[in-house]
Image: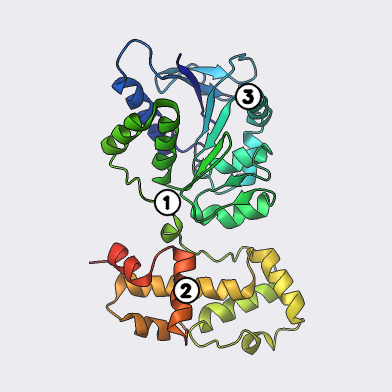
Amino acid sequence: MSKKLGLIVPHDYKLLSIAAILEVFETTNKLTSGNEKPFEIMIFQSKEQSDQGNIFGYNSNEIETSDIVLDLILIPAFTTDNMSEMIKKNRNFIPWLQKQHKAGAELASFCTGAFLFAASGLLNEKLATTHVDACSAFTKAFPMVKLKAEETLTADGSLYTSGGSTSTFHLLILLVQKFCGNEMAVNIAKIFSIDLNRYKQSYFSTFRPNHLHNDSLVAMLQQKIESQYHSIEKLEEITKDIPTSARNMTRRFKQVTGIPPIEYLQNIRVESSKKYLEQTQLSISEIIEKTGYNDPKAFRKVFYKMVGMKPIEYREKFRVQ
């Protein structure tokens, strides 16, 4: 019997995400011999949306009036960076997702789709991931979710999430494997040229400091770290003239940026080292010195932890020719 697959098409959806999802499951159906296909693909939208009727070649079902009970629901990525506004626009999907899951549906989100997924409360105390550059905002918004920022995908019971970009295909292949078997999953991976051995997304991350706040003391410390990271030996050196206690400064800094000052410094240094690895012929030792590390072992340990590969591997993968 075909599995009822529901793809939601919410406000601010990313077309590329929708296209990838449909392409993989439509291809799976085409590769299946016989009259009965593994997936009955359906589109779902809220009543207020303007795309009612035929969309992407499918009839659109209204979540407010549909009585269809699904086996699998897919939540695509979003185009906007304003996730709180996106969730507000798509709030009608939340009780519907909760109801479908209670009735037995498995749920999967792709990239930033995890924000709407988490807003349903279904990911509380569950493993999840999202686009690597959105992880800080996700952690702030949903502290009860066990975020695995470095993972390409997560599977926790009947709930699934993927990281950004091509991580979408890794989760799609996992779902094809679950419902159609290993042979079909391998065929799909070959058709879409997906490397089945990539488990981490951390090396695609780019640290983007948050300067959109009104805390002048935090801004002062950020500026000091960003301009002096290559020469800082101890954070106390640059915080002594900031008019607040070290404990209060750390608390405020983490509250505003999502991470403590020492981790902020590490991110700035690692981001700088990545640029040197990508754009210069400097040796690893020279890069270590230029980014403010005194201990090569410590640098390599921090780099591997934050990027997911060794510096030399990163250079080989991302070197600008």
- Would you say 7 lies left or right of 25 here? right
Quarter that holds the C terminus: bottom left
Image vertical order of residue 218 relative to residue 194, above or below: below
Q: Which mark is residue 301?
A: 2
Callout 1–callout 2 Cβ contact below 8 Å: no
The label nearer to you, 2 versus 3, is 2
Q: Across the whole image, how many numbered discs are drawn on residues? A: 3
Q: Residue furthest front?
A: 182
Image vertical order of residue 305 relative to residue 102, above or below: below
Residue type, numbered disc 1? Tyr
Q: Considering depth in this image, is 295 or 249 the residue closer to the camera?
A: 295
Residue type, numbered disc 2? Lys
Residue beneath disc 3: 100
- Would you say 273 lies left or right of 76 here? left
CA gap, disc 1 and disc 3: 29 Å
Mark 3, Cα crowd under 10 Å, few <14 / some 14-19 / many 20+, is many
> Residue 314, how many percent across, how many down?
35, 66
> Residue 206, how many percent across, how many down?
46, 62
CA gap, disc 2 and disc 3: 44 Å
Q: Residue furthest top?
A: 35
Image vertical order of residue 42 relative to residue 301, above or below: above
Q: Secondary structure at mark 3?
A: helix
Residue beneath disc 1: 199
Please report the residue visible at 43 percent of the width from the left and 62 percent of the height from the top: 308
Q: Considering depth in this image, is 303 or 236 the residue closer to the camera?
A: 303
- Give the mark nearest the N terminus, 2 or 3: 3
- Give the mark nearest the N terminus, 1 or 3: 3
